[in-house]
Amino acid sequence: MAVLTRYLGDLDLAEEAVQDAFAVAADRWPREGMPPSPAGWIITTARNRAVDHLRREAARGAKEAEALRLRGGRTSEEDDLLRLIFTCCHPALRQEAQVALTLRLVGGLTTPEIARAFLVPEATMAQRIVRAKAKIRDAGIPYRVPEEAELPDRLRPVLVVLYLIFNEGYAAGTGPALVRDDLCAEAIRLTRMLAALMPDEPEVSGLLALQLLIAARRPARTTVDGKLVRLGDQDRSRWDTALIAEGQRIVRACVRRGRPGPYQLQAAINAVHSAAPTAAATDWPAILQLYDQLTALAPTPVVALNRAVMVAEVTGPASALEIVDGLGLDRYHVFHAVRADLLRRLGRTAEAARAYERAAELTHNEAERRHLLAARGAD
Amino acid sequence: MKTYLLSLYQPDGPAPAPEFLEPIMRGLAELNQEMHDTGAFVFTAGLCPPGTATVVRVRDDETMLTDGPFTEGKEHLGGFTVVRAPDLDGALDWARRMAAITTLPVEVRPFQG
């Protein structure tokens, strides 16, 4: 065993080869008699078997590499990276595991860093990652880039994970700080990488543009003492013009391609916002039209809620409130915040105050809670 | 190649009518045949209702029998199929087709080793 392990440099392979050699011996020696040097015979036979095995593996590896080159024109390092992303975001893994694995294995963050970013104890995060790795190994989750036909189903969770990482950084669902910039930067870095690896997938570019355009508003989104500033009240001179220019360039390229998707449309909506020098100058009808398209592709209550906000700008708060009241989003704090704002604009202050309170109750973000309670008090 | 257990979970209660079951059984037979033809098939079985089960325990050398299934729930293991597949995606594909035919959830679990 030791001789073979040293020769082959692989304990598992050596073990297997020796077992094979003994099996051959058990079959042959009773018939043909024992060789002059039984130990030497075993080592030689095992080594020959192992070399055959390695040759077969190498041939298969070369064939695989050839196939991948034909398909994507990517280098083997790039393919490794893509394989890793798709393995980490395999739909058989739960979403929190996908997120943790992607940050750990693709992003290269340490487990304590990921634990801090998601405000969970380090031991919990470590266990989450260990369990996910064990499932990949034991369940045989493949390490490969999905075929063209399965790509829509397999790319979706990857984009969701990247968007979740970005959102966790930007909107920080829990905890005292409203924004965690390092997570936003990491999400943008990973999405940029994926966009470069999959240039034929407009939704990846759309997600990148969406993140860039939202991140561009980051300097204007909070006051020095950490208070939230809404889009309409932001000092637009503080927006990052370089990020806006890049985001808008990508959106224009997406529009030219004519293969719209939910991320591209959300990016386009944000591109229209960022093109307005003042909130009053926003092209609301253009945004509403984009929301109509988004509703057609992704008819979710949350999209309908955001669309209603645009309806308020185009046709007034009364028709918007009618739409909002028809949505069953009672557990969602933004639903109550939107209702509160519409009620306030309609002069129904008592109802507005109750809605602000409900929204403040439901949010887990301290800065947002303070903002909502201040809005209630202002009336 | 890895080996996977595909477990079919069905709701408790009386068995569905024969005219409902007949196309499902035909679909499963076709799927099993395809598993045979492609070399994926290892074993399959349907189980009698959970009311026919007996649980055996040994404590201090004394055997204790309990009438009924080990766990009572709203669903029970109705049958299972063992397949061999190159990786989880292969097993998930068989499971997806089983679930589509039966309209029941299918649990995929890898064998050890």
Image: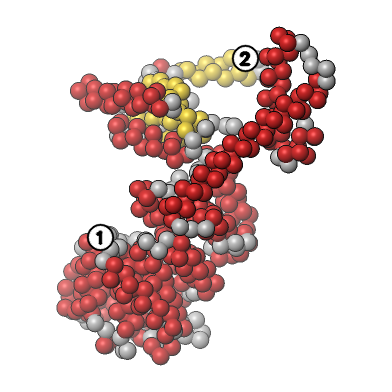
The three-letter amino acid code for the residue at tag 1 is Leu
Q: Is A270 drawn above or below residue B102 in the view shown?
A: below
Q: Quadrant of residue A230?
A: bottom left
Q: Nearer the viewer, residue A251 or B24?
A: A251
Report which residue position mark 2 lands on: B62
The three-letter amino acid code for the residue at tag 2 is Glu
**Residue B17, horizontal then vertical, whole percent:** 22, 23
Q: Is B53 drawn above or below residue A217 in the view shown?
A: above
Instruction: Report the residue that reaches farthest toward the top.
Output: A31
Q: Chain of mark 1?
A: A
- Residue B72 seen from this side: no
Q: Quadrant of residue B99?
A: top left
Counting labels gives: 2
**Residue A328, horizontal then vertical, whole percent:** 26, 59
Report which residue position mark 1 lands on: A297
Q: Is A169 drawn above or below residue B110 in the view shown?
A: below
Q: Badge 2: how crowded within 10 Å, few (<14), some, or many (20+)?
A: few
**Residue A310, horizontal then vertical, whole percent:** 24, 75
Q: CA distance from mark 1 to mark 2?
A: 64 Å
Residue at left offset 43%, top offset 31%: B6
Question: SS for tag 2?
Answer: strand
Q: Nearer the viewer, residue A305 or B109?
A: B109
Question: SS for tag 1?
Answer: helix
- Residue A226 seen from this side: yes
Q: Is B68 drawn above or below residue A83 in the view shown?
A: above
Residue at left offset 26%, top offset 80%: A344
A48 displayed left or right of A365: right
Residue at left offset 81%, top offset 25%: A40
A106 displayed left or right of A376: right
* 1 or 2: mark nearer the eye: 1
Q: Chain of mark 2?
A: B
Q: By what rule are the colours in the image chosen?
A: secondary structure
